[in-house]
Image (spheres, rainbow, N blue to C red):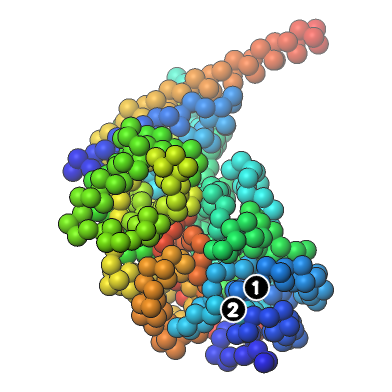
Amino acid sequence: VPPETPTGYPLPIAIDREGSLASIASAVRTISDHDNVSSLLVWIAGLPRDDMAAFESMLAQLPRPTVGALFPKLIVGASLLERGAIVIGLPSAHPPVCIPTLDGAGTELEAAIARLPLLPPASLLLVMADGWSPRLRTLAHAVFQEFGSSVCVMGGGAGSLMHPDMPCVFTNTGLLANAALLLAIPWPGGIGMGLAHGWRSASAPFKVTASEGHIVREFDHEPAVAVYDRVLNSMPSDPRRGRSLLELLSRHPLGVRRLDADVVLRDPVRLTADGQGIVCLCEVPVGAFVHVMRTDHRAMVRAARVADSSARRALGQRTPVARFVFDCVSREAFLDAGIGEELEIFADGVPTVGALTIGEIASEGEHHLEYHNKSIVVTQLAGESLP
Amino acid sequence: VISQLTLHTELLLQLALGIGHGDTLDEMASTAAATMLRALNASGVLLLHTMHADGAPMEDPHAVAMLPHRLKRHPARRELAQAYSDRRLAHVMVARSLADPLVLDAGRGVAMVWPLPGFGVLVVFRATVLSPEFLQSLPPILDLLARTARRYAQDRDAHEAIALTRLTAVCV
């Protein structure tokens, strides 16, 4: 099946709905051959693990510089693709920065990020990183230490839900795990960005009194799980109702408070081996104040609308010509069939592509750049199509 | 209200703990600025060394910490620099107290400027002005920053003086 090459997008784009190596290669070739394309951005979902070696061979042979990531699912308009690829031709992007390991100190990450050249203010800095790395908060902070709010930053955690150790970001030289790619795309027409999650507090704040990286050991000097359990027990409608512990953790994330801004969610993914601590997707520092959060379908869908309208509002009078969306994969798990309702807002005629992600990064105006979980990021691009 | 106070207390503690780390003035100032950037949910922090410990103005006021590293390109920083040169800012801030920051519209947000007695000036770029309740709690932290920065600067001067003396002795 030849790839779709929808019109109306401001950049050459091919969409492959099959997800085989041959069909991905065909989509890549279609865009590579396009006039004015100097490099490629490729997002893939559902690539079988057994195809990794062949995929790397394919990457090495590509005629143009290529970067991309493997995501749990892709978004095209208002629909989800479990298997497939989105190939975007970029006419002029600065050479991407690849951070091959995220284990280094924050200053090492900053040094790598500083390799990016000076960017015009209307630039989108796209961050694709291994979503299972517990260092994405440090990465977001390092990006902010370099650029601040001078550019719009949109980031998504890549990876597989089934195989957390699977390499998931790539360049022509191959696939990498525990790595990040930063790609700056100048966009003079204007960029608007919105982020929202839709969760609200279900508890008083607790202080994190013991944590190690992404493992929260204690709240207020008590085992974290005991406090978490107590909050669930105190909820007016029983949140347990036959749900597994994993479901409960996913439905009731932790919300870390910030000064003059909405809480940042931290996704608890499992308990520690001793059953006393909570393992989160990213670092939760000692001293942070956290709430146990709750939400419902309506609030989640409303949050997606808020993110989209914030992005639209940021454009002012300019007309959006395209939209990028990074939507946390855990929102799909929560909404289940209701994810269609959330994505429906992208059926408004503005060409939209994106991915379900494992953690999100997004500029929020003059606020400090944060790494988020369970959130949706919408970026709207305005102005003329690029040549 | 209590919930807000606990957050403020924690942030003040974080700010205090972020002051005084590093072997040199630049290292200490960078660590303090990075802590402020996060804890104050700010978009930029600038620490200017503008005066000697005795309060006399320096001939060459300069930044000892600037975050983000590309802050010079930030519209808010450019607007502030257009309105006030570093030297003029230092001069204006002499008349201010730690409890009375200068607040200026800058870029898409505000710039809040505090004097650091015997050292210089602190500029924090934010989306909005800090709440009055939080502002009331800040002076002891700013005083700690001023005293620490002053001590680091004096140590640096002392080290430079010792090095110069040794060099002179060798030459003679």
Left or right position of B65 against A12: left
Q: Under tag 1, what secondary structure?
A: loop
Residue corresponding to mark 2: A83
Q: Nearer the viewer, residue A96 or A360?
A: A360
Mark 2 in CB contact with mark 1 (< 8 angstroms): yes
Q: Nearer the viewer, residue A36 or A5?
A: A5
Residue A229 placed where, x, y %? 29, 47
* Residue B5 image-quadrant placement: top left
Q: Kindly identify the residue that appears in the image at 41 percent across and 42 percent down.
A: A275
Amino acid beneath label 2: Arg
Q: Kindly identify the residue that appears in the image at 49 percent across and 49 percent down.
A: A282
Can residue A335 be seen in the rendering of this structure? yes
Q: Kindly identify the residue that appears in the image at 60 percent across and 61 percent down.
A: A163
Amino acid beneath label 1: Leu
Q: CA distance from mark 2 to mark 1?
A: 7 Å
Q: Under tag 2, what secondary structure?
A: loop
Q: Kindly identify the residue that appears in the image at 43 percent across and 29 percent down.
A: B17
Residue B28 placed where, x, y %? 53, 30
State which tag comes first along the sequence, 2 or 1. 1
Quadrant location of the C terminus of chain A? bottom right
Left or right position of B79 against A111: left
Left or right position of B34 against A34: left
Chain of the residue where label 1 is placed in the rendered structure = A
Q: Nearer the viewer, residue A114 or B76?
A: A114
Q: In the picture shown, does residue A250 fall above or below B98? A: below
Determine crowd level at label 1: few under 14, some 14-19, many 20+ residues with C-alpha closer than 10 A: many
Left or right position of A30 against B135: right
Residue corresponding to mark 1: A47
